[in-house]
Image (spheres, rainbow, N blue to C red):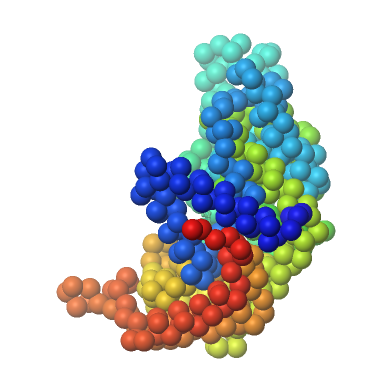
């Protein structure tokens, strides 16, 4: 950010006051909930690994008349008139993304991570299935296909294979999980992690890929607390003739901030890379696709192939956030995210807690709460009672399944934005340990053991909240932003 932070905070305060007054004149309950959301976020320890706090500049950019504009198509090639200003912001978002990540091509339209992944899947299918089939059938595009040809093409689309990381190993549901469309549109198989270490076993991934021969090999995770070697994943993809797609939604901030470099930076190795823009990247809620030139034209067909009209106000905010991420200060922020995750993991380890893989080298710490005799659901609720906001998560081969789970996932991006460092994260580990070691499983109405109910010893929530508040007060959210 350039300019005097104090003066900018004052200006932002006036802007939000004015906005809330205008909103309240129509629906005061929305204005009230908006105020309350800020107060709630300010007074809790936000440790959800996929959340962050975007800057006032990013937030304010989303609240404009760009929201009113339709702009299906691509920059300079729209299905609607008068898109000159949308062209400006979309081109800026794409330019910042290309420069920041060193990608040949960037597409800023996806509304979310799942949309970005859908765009990527369809671009890969178009590039590797549709185009060769059209050539073989002597057609320029699908409109020239006969009914029989079209049937054949549909069959080819429907018979493609995808290999992704299993959900309970830390993968994401869009990486081929059965209840997600990715698990229905592809024949899918999953790779897991080593049962002893919890770490990715590249030889096992390679063996599975040789046997399954997927069209798409997906790398990336939402709950794996370790770095991935993308050079090795590309080698596996090349050996079996697969396209390497990397979903870096969780760790895009660590790539942008040059914490993940060399073989840990997916962008040069993946054919197509997807991300969200609101997690460690600290932008607006949205998605982004980066691609090698070979896939650019197919990614560009994302809207209207699988996306509705672009959210121009969000693309404008992506441009602002990506500009922020290109500042040197973002590299310091990204390094702090990773250092703080280590501090949190050490804090847990020194208190005897059990971590999946034993630690972390990214922004995630995955705590196995079975060592406290709890399910993830019980632990998540007891922590929330104490002002600690986390989410429950499966651990590898989780005996409690994806609903109750045995894990709690912690992430450091949000509190790092607030200014937390080593000592604060050690205290966070202490507070979590205090809550969990004073929580006992409850019973259901029939008196049988329950995976959901729990009892938190008296006084613990208040004690933990008071200690958390001290740290929160010292590290204010949006310093200087005061609503009247
Ligand atoms: N909701 C995101 C996360 O928490 O990881 C992924 O969908």
Whether residue 441 is visible to the viewer of this picture, yes or no, is yes
Question: On the image, which quarter does residue 291 sit in?
Answer: top right
Q: Nearer the viewer, residue 466 or 410?
A: 466
The residue under the point 40% across, 54% down is 33
Depth check: 337 or 479 in front?
A: 479
Residue 151 image position (x, y, % from top left): 52, 20
Is residue 126 shown above or below 389? above
Count the labels in the image.
Answer: 0
Q: Which residue is drawn at 65% across and 23% down?
A: 83
- Compared with 442, 245 (above or below) is above
Question: Relative to residue 387, is residue 169 drawn left or right?
Answer: right
Q: Which residue is drawn at 61% across and 79% down?
A: 424
- Residue 71 image position (x, y, % from top left): 60, 25
Quarter of the N terminus within the rendering: bottom right
Residue 84 horizontal side relative to residue 384, left or right: right
- Position of 309 relative to 16 (above/below): above
How far across and how far down the image is residue 97, in percent?
Answer: 74, 44
User: In which quadrant of the rendered view does residue 481 lie?
Assistant: bottom right
- In the rendered image, which quarter is residue 92 located in? top right
Q: Would residue 356 be visible to someone looking at this image?
A: no
Query: What residue is shown at x 53% (from left), y 29% (from top)?
Result: 68
Question: Which x, y percent locates residue 160?
Answer: 58, 37
């Amino acid at each position: 950010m350039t300019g005097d932070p104090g003066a900018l905070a004052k200006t932002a305060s006036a802007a939000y006051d004015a906005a809330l007054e205008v909103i309240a004149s129509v629906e005061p309950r929305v204005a009230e909930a908006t105020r309350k959301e800020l107060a709630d976020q300010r007074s809790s320890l936000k440790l959800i690994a996929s959340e962050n706090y975007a800057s006032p500049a990013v937030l304010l950019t989303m609240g404009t008349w760009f929201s009113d504009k339709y702009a299906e198509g691509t920059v300079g090639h729209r299905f609607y008139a008068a898109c000159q200003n949308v062209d400006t912001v979309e081109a800026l978002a794409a330019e910042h993304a290309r420069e920041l990540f060193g990608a040949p091509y960037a597409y800023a339209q996806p509304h979310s991570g799942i949309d970005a992944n859908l765009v990527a899947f369809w671009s890969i299918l178009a590039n590797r299935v549709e185009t060769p089939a059209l050539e073989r059938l002597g057609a320029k595009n699908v409109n020239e296909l006969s009914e029989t040809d079209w049937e054949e093409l549909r069959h080819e689309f429907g018979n493609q294979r995808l290999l992704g990381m299993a959900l309970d190993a830390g993968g994401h549901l869009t990486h081929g999980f059965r209840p997600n469309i990715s698990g229905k549109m592809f024949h899918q198989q999953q790779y897991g992690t080593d049962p002893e270490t919890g770490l990715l076993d590249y030889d096992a991934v390679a063996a599975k890929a040789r046997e399954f021969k997927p069209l798409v090999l997906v790398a990336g995770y939402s709950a794996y607390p370790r770095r991935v070697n993308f050079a090795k994943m590309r080698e596996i993809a090349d050996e079996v003739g697969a396209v390497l797609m990397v979903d870096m939604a969780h760790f895009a901030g660590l790539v942008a901030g040059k914490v993940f470099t060399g073989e840990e930076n997916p962008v040069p190795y993946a054919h197509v890379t997807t991300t969200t823009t609101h997690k460690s990247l600290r932008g607006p809620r949205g998605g982004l696709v980066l691609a090698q030139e070979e896939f650019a034209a197919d990614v560009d067909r994302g809207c209207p192939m699988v996306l509705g009209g672009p959210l121009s106000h969000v693309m404008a905010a992506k441009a602002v956030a990506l500009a922020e991420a290109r500042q040197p200060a973002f590299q310091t922020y990204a390094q702090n995210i990773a250092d703080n995750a280590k501090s949190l993991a050490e804090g847990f380890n020194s208190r005897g807690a059990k971590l999946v893989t034993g630690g972390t080298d990214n922004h995630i710490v995955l705590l196995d709460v079975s060592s406290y005799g709890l399910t993830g659901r019980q632990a998540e609720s007891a922590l929330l009672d104490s002002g600690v906001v986390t989410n429950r998560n499966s651990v590898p081969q989780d005996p409690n399944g994806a609903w109750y789970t045995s894990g709690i996932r912690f992430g450091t991006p949000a509190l790092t934005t607030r200014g937390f460092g080593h000592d604060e994260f050690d205290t966070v580990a202490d507070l979590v340990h205090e809550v969990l070691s004073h929580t006992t499983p409850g019973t259901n109405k029939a008196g049988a053991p329950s995976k959901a109910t729990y009892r938190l010893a008296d006084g613990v929530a208040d004690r933990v909240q008071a200690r958390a508040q001290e740290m929160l007060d010292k590290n204010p959210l949006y310093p200087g932003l005061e609503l009247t």
